Amino acid sequence: MSHQEIKRVFELSAMLFAHNTYQSLTHAIIHYFNSLDGVEEVAAYEIFGDVAKSEDVLIRRFPISLDEIDRDDNLNLIMRNLAESRGGVSLTEGEAGEPWIFLDVFNNVKPRRVILLKGALNETDMAIIEGLHRIYSNQVALLDSKERDALTHLLNRQTLEVTLNDIIVFYRGKDVRSQPKKSWIAILDIDFFKRVNDEFGHLYGDEVLLHFSRLMDKTFRHSDFLFRYGGEEFVVIINSCDEAAVELTLQRFRETVEAHAFPSGNITVSIGYTLIDRIAPPALLMEYADRALYYAKEHGRNQVKNFNTMEEGVTKEGDIDLF
């Protein structure tokens, strides 16, 4: 590389280091790749599940797309290269023999990330891409640890705000209520958790939170988003579900928690949820789910309540009527 080329690599590296979220980092590297001569298309993906078991794999396009992946023209190319790749940058071909560059971030961080570049590049640009791939991989790992709760390793409250906003943006321009499959946000609150800490101590309390988060991970799908909201409150965003399916899913999780052997004995959970509307701001959606949760806790706990179908006139103390 010439002096100017080396200088350019350092400038690009500094540009990537300046980003403090995975979303902004990935947008930045996609923007740079699109600026290269010879690049016709850039697409980024998140890969969930075991690649060796194709039926267990979910591929989601970046930024958040909840459309079915089988509509994506690059699906076969991704699956073919994932089976052979162990990370790094490789040259490959599409079904018509067109040149592609396959960037695989395979660094023990879930989900696995892939970036595809369509086109043929010169030797210098390829060297820059390989260097940026290593920097991007390291940054993804660093940002992943920043965006997760330290105890449960679920996504944290700050990441929830970004994710929920991205989902609302995805639905803009779509008639959400006319679609059979929608997205929903639920707040899950462990019943009487303070008693666990008071009777058994905070170490037992942490064990309960860990067990609870693992049950979430086992119960919900790769296409859903799981968060620890704070304390004993958790949040799940359930995607591509109709109203009956989301109710069934949340009831099944509630029953799973009730039947589980926690270190401190039996535990139950109260759940409030609402439809993610493309018009409502994130804070209002969280308020709706929280009101449904409050109703569930005030009416016996260990139950699931949908804000959109709650009884009229239900209020929190001092609040106006919900409807």
Image (spheres, rainbow, N blue to C red):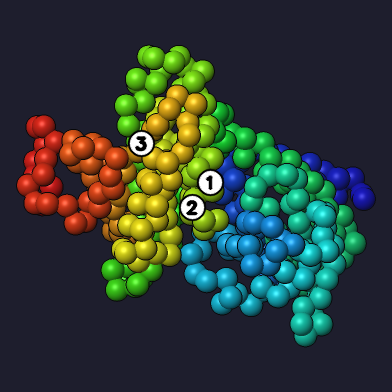
N-terminal-most mark, 1 or 3: 1
Left or right side of 34 for 70: left
Which residue, given by chain and number where applicable, does mark 1 sit on? 217
Asked whether disc 1 touches disc 2, contact meaning CB atoms under 8 Å apart, the reply is yes
N-terminal-most mark, 2 or 3: 2
Left or right side of 30 for 320: left
Which residue, given by chain and number where applicable, does mark 3 sit on? 268
- For the residues labelled 1 and 2, the Cα–Cα distance comes to 6 Å
Q: How many numbered marks have been drawn onto this rendered protein structure?
A: 3
- Write down the quadrant of residue 191 in the picture: top left
Badge 2 crowding class, 10 Å Cα cut-off, few under 14, some 14 to 19, many 20 or more, is some
Asked whether disc 1 touches disc 3, contact meaning CB atoms under 8 Å apart, the reply is no
The amino acid type of the residue labelled 2 equals Phe
Which residue does the image show at 57% across and 42% down from the upper left? Answer: 21
The amino acid type of the residue labelled 1 equals Asp
Q: Secondary structure at mark 2?
A: loop
Percent across and percent down for residue 265 are 43, 27
Which residue does the image show at 76% across and 58% down from the upper left? Answer: 103
- For the residues labelled 1 and 3, the Cα–Cα distance comes to 17 Å
Which residue does the image show at 59% across and 45% down from the upper left? Answer: 22
Above or below, 167 against 289 in this view is below
Camera-nearest residue between 97 and 37: 97
Residue 189 visible within the image:
yes
Q: Secondary structure at mark 1?
A: helix
Which residue, given by chain and number where applicable, does mark 2 sit on? 220
